[in-house]
Every structure is written in structure tokens, then in C-alpha cells.
Amino acid sequence: MKIQSNQSNINFRSGLTSKMKTEISGCDISKISNEFAKTGIATDFKNNKVIAWCSLKSLEIIQALNKKFNLNLALPKAIYVEDFNNLRISDKNSPGFCNTAPSKLYMGNIGNAVVPERVIFFNSFSEFQTGNENTIWNCLDSISDMSYSERNSATNFFLETFLHEFTHCIHLNNMLQKLGGENLVKNIQKAFSPSYLKKFHSQYDNMLKQICDYAAENPMEAVGCDFSKRLIESLDRNNLTPQNNFIHKSPYESRRGFSLFKQEAPLDAGLRKFWNGKF
């Protein structure tokens, strides 16, 4: 998602209600961090109420899905807010990312610290801040609509960015169970190699752009965009609770619950492959 845009005619429909905005402004970040700590998730929200509250709502949605539909969707190991200029990543303007494998992401004095997989980072956008206001994140409504209008996300829902990163954690855990750690690292490296991406784009671009343009970036983003879209479409957007098991009869259902003889559409067949790490 790009933060700056030339788009001028944006409809603000991302779903962030007045009640939710009031909850965000009055939330206690230390209590939110304690809720994450109960599940073993480390957090450092850098006093950003928007990120803390939206992360908590995303956690509650995944927990509700697991409980209501007897699922086992994995959670992040940690969530941190950082200035992306201090990280060894190429896209400094990204709002967030999920670390896919143990990596040395930090620069400076802690540059040798290894960050494990399934750790989510959200961008502090420190260069956009004035005083104590997190000005970019306080425009979450407009950012969500802008990202959707530019086809950088599959929905314009305000939790899209957060649920998308949670989805990467779910995806990584599924691939780990299917492949094991060593093969998972090899397959992820393959998925980002120029030779593989050339074939990937040739075969899947047109199909994946039915979801959104960003889904055609690589197989990880294909799953991230599609899974989070299906999840969001399953929600009651007023109370942020899942209404149905969107995984049933989807590419993310296990073969135990999916007929081996059923003919899948090419898009769903590709998503199932990516979901299981078959790059």
C-alpha cells in the first residue's frame, strides 16, 4: 500500500464508526498489551492507540473464529511498531509486514538481533508525525479507501492492513506444518527468486488481479489478500464478529473436508497450492 496518492475522489466507507473512534481515543495501551501477553504475544505499540486497538480487534476476531468453528488459526509471536527507516527492508513506506523467517532486521546497535518468523511490524511513519499525533494512522479511514481505490488491497475495510498481516502468520504456520522448517525456508526463498516470479506472473497475474493488483505480487501476497478478503466478508462489521466459517469450501480447507475429486476453478487451485507452500 502506498501512503501518498494522486487520487482525489475517494468514498469513505471503510467501516470505522464514531463509536469505534471513541474507543480508540480512550483505549489503555497497557491493558491491550496485557491482553496480548495472556496469549504469549509480545508487543510494543510505541503509544500508538490506533495500531494497538486495531491489533486487539484482529486478535479477537481470530480467537472468535477458532472458538466458534473449531479452527486452529495461528497467532503472531509478537507485534511491534517501528520506524521502518531503521529496518533492513526495501519498502520503507509499507504500513506493515510479517517476518517470514528468522532474520536480522534491525540496524544500529541491535543489528545482530534475530527476529523470529511470525512477528508483525507496523510502521510508525515517524517522519509524518507532528507532536504526539500519529497523523498517518489517525487517517485510517482515508488510507483504507485509498488503498482499495488503487487496487493495493482487496477491501477498503479499516482492519484490512491488520488482518492481512495476521493472515501471513496463519499461512506461515500452515506451511510449517505441511513442510517442516527447513523446507519452508527453501520454498519461501524460491517464491521470491526472480526466476520463479517470472513464471508466477506469466501464469497467475490475470487470475490473481481478480482479487486485487497486490495479490499478483507473489504467492504469499496472493494468499494474504484473498484470505483476508474472505475473512472480512464473513464479519458483522458493526460488532466485528465472524458470522460464518469462510474456510469451508475454500482453498484453505484441508483435503479431509474437501473432495479430492471435485474440480476446482484455476484461481482456487492456485491459491490452494500457495496455501500449502507448493511454489
Image: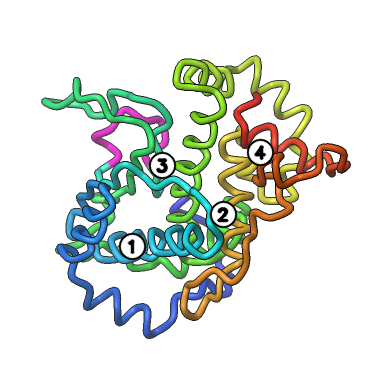
Q: Which residue is mark 3?
A: 97
| Dot 3 or dot 1, earlier in sequence | 1
Residue at 53 percent across and 57 percent down: it is 70
| Residue hosting label 1 | 56
Q: Report the Cα–Cα distance between label 4 and label 2.
A: 15 Å
**Quarter residue 246 falls in:** bottom right
Q: Is 239 above or below relative to 93?
A: below
- Write down the residue under mark 2: 228
Name which residue lies at 53% across and 36% down: 174
Looking at marks 3 and 2 on the same chain, the residue that comes earlier in the sequence is marked by 3
Q: Residues within 10 Å of mark 1 (few under 14, many from 20)?
A: some
Type of the residue with mark 3: Phe
Residue 186's place in the image compared with 262, above or below, is: above
Q: The residue tagged with tag 4: helix, strand or loop? A: helix
Vertical comparison of 2 with 185: above or below: below
Instruction: Please state which of the two labelled residues, at mark 3 or mark 2, is closer to the viewer.
Output: 2
Identify the amino acid type marked 2.
Ser
Q: Residue at x 31, y 30 (%)?
A: 116
- Highlighted range, magenta: 84-92
Amino acid bearing label 4 = Ala
Q: Nearer the viewer, residue 187 or 151?
A: 187
The disc at residue 216 is: 4
- Report if residue 1 is visible in the image: no
- SS for callout 1: helix
Neighbour class for label 4 at 10 Å: few (<14), some, many (≥20)? many
